[in-house]
Amino acid sequence: MNKLGTTAGLEHYQMLVDGVWRDSSEKATFDSINPATSQPWARVPVASEQDIGDAVQAARRAFETGPWAASSPLQRATLLRKLGDLISDNAGELARIQVLENGRLIREVSGRARALANHAYFFAGVAESPTGETLASSVPNMQVFTVREPIGVVAAITPWNSPLTLLLWKLCPALAAGNTVVVKPSEITPVSTLVLAGLFSEAGFPDGVVNVVTGAGSVGATLAAHPGVDKIAFTGSTAVGKKIARTAADRLARVSLELGGKSPNIVFPDADLTSAVNGVVGGIFTATGQTCMAGSRVLVHTDIYDEFCDALIARTERVKIGDPMDPDTEMGTMACRAQYDRVLHYIEVAKEDGARLATGGDRPEAPEFVGGLYIRPTVFTDVDNHMRIAREEVFGPVAVAIRFSDEDDAVAIANDTRFGLAAGVWTNDLAKAHRMVRRLRAGTVWVNNYRRTNHVAPFGGFKESGIGRENGFHAIEEYTEVKTVWIDTGNQITDPFSRP
Ligand code: NAD
């Protein structure tokens, strides 16, 4: 059992190592805090070096010996389908825990449960899909082909904003391909991962195939540096992603990195402006702005700048902030105190740099918000792309509206960033839309919509937004090595050193 029980209102959870639920070998624990009340609600172990080593060893054993090492694609597909069913059956509990951990809206995370199950079903299909190629041979009687093989032990290190989605983006392709994994969830959101790990066990994944160690960033650093880890799949900040890349470089471990963003959402005068306002509001304020793909830079053509900003501000002021468990709430809390402080700090920086605070910029005052990490949805206008508020990832409910004069100017401003995760374009001019798609340096471009992702479409970043792609058939490439095979079917091998 991942959950030991509840004492004095605190739910107690254990880690999963080699199929066994256990406490830290050093008995250390930490608490998960509910950001809507600032009260602890769950207690979780802090993995020791010993626990991390045990988890990696268990994953290595499961990779090299036993039922998983001998598993067929059909067997892995069957397990993934069973997992998808269990995710659907347990959607309510998974949603409840995510809300308690990070303040995401109950209506948002409940809706995503179906998407999580679809992920498992899709990669069940991928497990059985053809993956090698038959190649042309330069000599007769020679068969040349490739096979894709699992990399080995994968460390999956995840952030707090979408703990289950971003974890399944890694686990489903990794397991479909036959790898084993050690997961290190964010210290803000460890419990949802532990409960999900229980579903892997219940589905019948053999012991050691999925392990979870919990704790702060230092646990992630120890795991990433472990010589028994063959690949690190990381989602998180660009700063930590760079550290992980350096660690991996020492032993040339494989890495995929899904990192931060400062994505432009670009509105042209010929767009359907009602849709564009809705898309811009959803693009930045969904999940209280705590998403990597947040459309945090709103680029608006000068001819409609004032009119569009007025409509954006008016809609922003109607966003219903409140208890994340209330299905009517449109925007919940920041996930943790550090993030709350960081966002309020950036709001001050923006004001000092001369951006005009058009709405929001502080916490709501009503009594029901006391104790919760609430910040009002915020819009800055008259923002210059060189200001810090336009260059650095805030990861909160803060939109900055930047003026542009024409298509070239929009492209120049949009691409003037070290990030390249996503971009949005709002226009009814088909040719312009295509031109913009090709000119924007970002891993995903949405035209007349924003924030769409699914299990089929690859997702990842250009530039400092990351390396590699998750989702779709591209994901399987991140978890496999290509082996090339040459088979001679009838040539006589002559002495290579004899003269004719
Ligand atoms: P973070 O980088 O602080 O932490 C991410 C994970 O790494 C956590 O589990 C943390 O404990 C661990 N960690 C911290 N230091 C480490 C170290 N030195 N070595 C190994 N692991 C370490 O990120 P966060 O604050 O949890 O999440 C927010 C960030 O994640 C934002 O920058 C956001 O843009 C990014 N993000 C990216 C995507 C994407 O798909 N591109 C999706 C969601 C979030």
Image (cartoon, grey):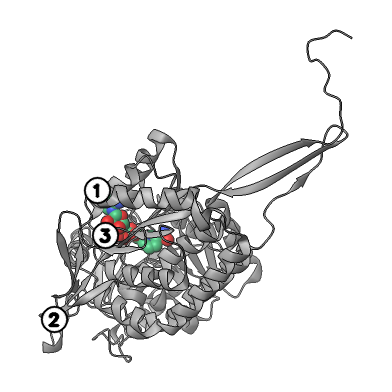
Q: Are marks 2 and 3 in contact (CB under 8 Å)?
A: no
> Is residue 14 rendered to the left or right of residue 277?
left
Residue 358 appears in view: no
Expressed as whole percent of the image width and height from the top left, the position of residue 182 reads 37, 55
Q: Nearer the viewer, residue 138 or 196?
A: 196
Secondary structure of the residue carrying tag 3 is loop
Report x, y in % for residue 93. 34, 82
User: Given the image, on which type of amino acid does mark 1 rest?
Assistant: Gln
In this rendered view, identify the residue nearer to me: 182 or 205: 205
> Foreground mark, 2 or 1?
1
Disc 3 target residue: 214
CB of mark 2 near ligand 1 (< 8 Å): no
**Left or right of 389 on screen, residue 91:** right
Asked whether the beta carbons under mark 3 and mark 1 sit within 8 Å of each other, the answer is no
Q: Position of residue 237 (x, y in %)?
A: 33, 55
- In front here: 262 or 64? 64
Amino acid of disc 3: Thr
In the picture, the quarter occupied by the N terminus is: bottom left
The answer to whether mark 2 and mark 1 are in CB contact below 8 A is no
| Residue at the far front in the pictured view | 66
Asked if residue 490 can be seen in this view, the reply is yes
Residue 9's mark? Answer: 2
Q: Give, as a three-letter code, the residue at label 2.
A: Gly
Label 2 and label 1: CA atoms lie apart by 30 Å
Residue 91 found in image quarter: bottom left
Residue at image position (29%, 71%) is 2
Q: Quadrant of residue 32?
A: bottom left
Give the residue drawn at x 56%, y 73%.
121
Mark closer to the chain start, 2 or 1? 2
Q: Quadrant of ligand 1?
A: bottom left
Q: Nearer the viewer, mark 3 or mark 1?
A: 1
> Residue beneath label 1, please?
50
